[in-house]
Structure formats: structure tokens, C-alpha cells
Amino acid sequence: MRIPTHLRRAAAAALTLLAAAAAQAAGTVGNSFPAGFTAFEDASLGKPIIGFGAAGAVTRTPVIFLHGNNDVPYATACSPTNGKIQGLAQHLADNGWNPSELWGLGYQGDQCDLAADNTRRSGIAHTNQANVPDLRRFVRAVLAYTGARQVDIVAHSLGVTLAREWMRQDDAESKVRRLVAIDGPNHGIINCSASPLNYYQLPASGGFTPSSEVCQELGSPDTPFLKLLNGRRGWDEWEWPTRVLVIRNADTSFVYFALQDGLFPPVPSVDIYGKTVDFSKSADLKGAKQVDLTGQGAYDPVLGTAHLGILQSPQTKAEMLKFLKR
């Protein structure tokens, strides 16, 4: 007997849902949001946000994972080698966290829009300011769905300043119990160098010119954005009750050091104003617990970079786990 097409499709959909439920029950971090969790529209992209989360019991503080610029919360068709922030979530799932306590936000979509214009990597939709509304709504949604009163945040690169800027704008320190800040651009990035030798300015390399929107935020420790973000507490950048752990590269990282990082050659350490600046300690935050790591390029099997390798290393996973378990 021939089974009608609509019945076959319904059966396939049911099997997919059962497989997803089984994976979550087994402690596997998925690639979608659970039923009943509203995937609201991305404020800068006009599409539903992507990310991960799960239904189920919540006994720990939920953890929100934030990727960096030009990245995704899990591997996508247009970004198949990225999404390693999901691996940090899986490490917590392997060590006692329920998938229902682990949430990821893809605040820049699936990156498929970059195929039409690679300079979007440095454009307005990839800035901190453009994505604060998405993080704000996501935290509210996670708190409402889980019934929790606080979240922990684990962030990499741009995700670090995004989390800090949302907390600054909303006075949200009471909502964040702990923040793990992995190699974040707290004092700017070298990629926006005004030097003509800065190849990141090329359209094919992302268009990180001094006038691009991302560079206007992060191209110098003296941009209005970073002066406001880092100056709110005057003498100290982190005086809030939120506990903070900084994990940073201490030897090289292509966004901060004028040194080779994997396949990426160095660029001059000059800011968007043409001033020579040492960005090598950009990830530091005064008042935070800090762990310096070296040799992290060994954990980036694609490009060999420390900036991406640190997101996947056993040292980072161990320090994150220890910090969040306290």
C-alpha cells in the first residue's frame, strides 16, 4: 500500500523531534530551541535568531554562550568549520549540566549573507551596539523559560564586549552571576589598523577600514564606545558583583598581537587614528580573575590560530568548568 506524501512527511517530522528529544535526554547539546521558546526576530538582520537550548529540569544557573564576530553558535551550511562555542556547552553537559541549562545565541545569523558582501564582517550588523537588543531579549526569554533569576555567560571575542555593553546599558549586574570572558576585545583590535599594510582593510578580508562600523567601536582603546564601556566605574573596569574570569592568549592572537597567528600574517600595531598602540593586553579586565594561556593555536585544526584555538582548548574548558562550579 502506498503511504500518502503528507503522512510520510508527518512521520519524518515526528522522528526528527523524537531524535532531538533523545539527544537532549542523553546530554547532547542540540542545534535548535525547544518547543514553547520563541525565536524572536534578529534586530539587525530581520530574520529569526538562531541558537540552541532545551526543555527540561533546571537546577543550576542557566549558561548563555556568545560567539565572536563572524562566527555562529554551531556549525552552519555557510559556516561549517565554526560554531565551536557549542563545544564549550557540550563540555558542561558532559560534566553534570542539563541541556536545559545551556543556551546559545546566534546574534549574527548563519553568516550566509556574507557571500553577497564580505565587508559585512565589519559592518553595522556585526557591531556591539546593533546586537545588544538581541542579547537583551534573549536573556529575558531564557529567564522566563527556565524560571531562573540569573544567568551565567560564557563569551568569546566580540561576545565579551557585547555582554559587557548590555550589562552597562541595562545595569544588569544583578542578572549575571558569572562571566567567562575569553580573549575579548576590551581595549580594541589590531585588525582596524590605519596602516596601508593592514590587509584586513581589503574587501576580500572583511573591509576593516578605520571608518567601518566595527572599527569605529573597537579600532582603538580611545574610541567613544570603549571609553564609555571601560570608564563607567572610573578607576576599575569591573567593580560589579558579577564574578568575572578572563581567559586570554598571552603569546599571540591575530586580533591583538603584531605577530604571526597560524595562517594569518601580522599587521602593524596602529589604531584607527594612526597612533602606535599595544593591543596585546586588550583582553585584560582590571578587577577580574585572569588566566593567561600560550600555544593555543594547536587547538585550531583549520587555521592554526591561537584566537580560535583558545575557544576549543582543554585548558579553557577546565578553567571554565572550575569557575562555574564554584
Image (cartoon, rainbow, N blue to C red):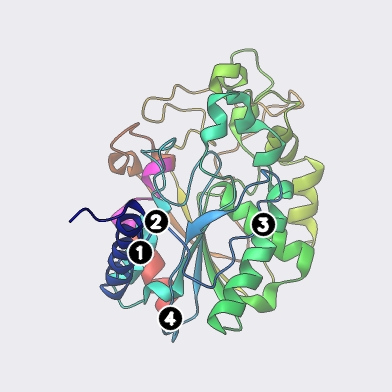
Q: The disc labelled 4 sits on which kind of residue?
A: Arg
Image coords of residue 114 (percent x, y)? 56, 29
Q: Which label's residue is closer to the chain start, 3 or 1?
A: 1
Question: Mark 4 or 2, which is nearer the eye?
Answer: 2
At numbered mark 1, what does the secondary structure look like: helix, strand or loop? loop
Question: Mark 1 or 2, which is nearer the eye?
Answer: 1
Q: List the residue tagged with mark 2.
A: 86
Q: Quadrant of the N terminus?
A: bottom left
* Residue occupying image coordinates x 70% and y 45%: 44
Q: Spatial distance from mark 1 to mark 2, Cα to Cα?
A: 7 Å
| Whether residue 198 is visible | no
Q: The disc labelled 2 sits on which kind of residue?
A: Gln
Q: Spatial distance from mark 4 to mark 1, Cα to Cα?
A: 22 Å
At numbered mark 4, what does the secondary structure look like: helix, strand or loop? loop
Q: List the residue tagged with mark 4.
A: 326
Identify the mark at residue 235; answer none if there is no mark. none
Q: Spatial distance from mark 3 to mark 4, Cα to Cα?
A: 29 Å
Identify the mark at residue 134; answer none if there is no mark. 3
| Whether residue 173 is visible | yes
Q: Residues at badges 1 and 2 in contact (C-beta under 8 Å)?
A: yes
Q: List the residue tagged with mark 1.
A: 29
Q: Residues at badges 3 and 1 in contact (C-beta under 8 Å)?
A: no
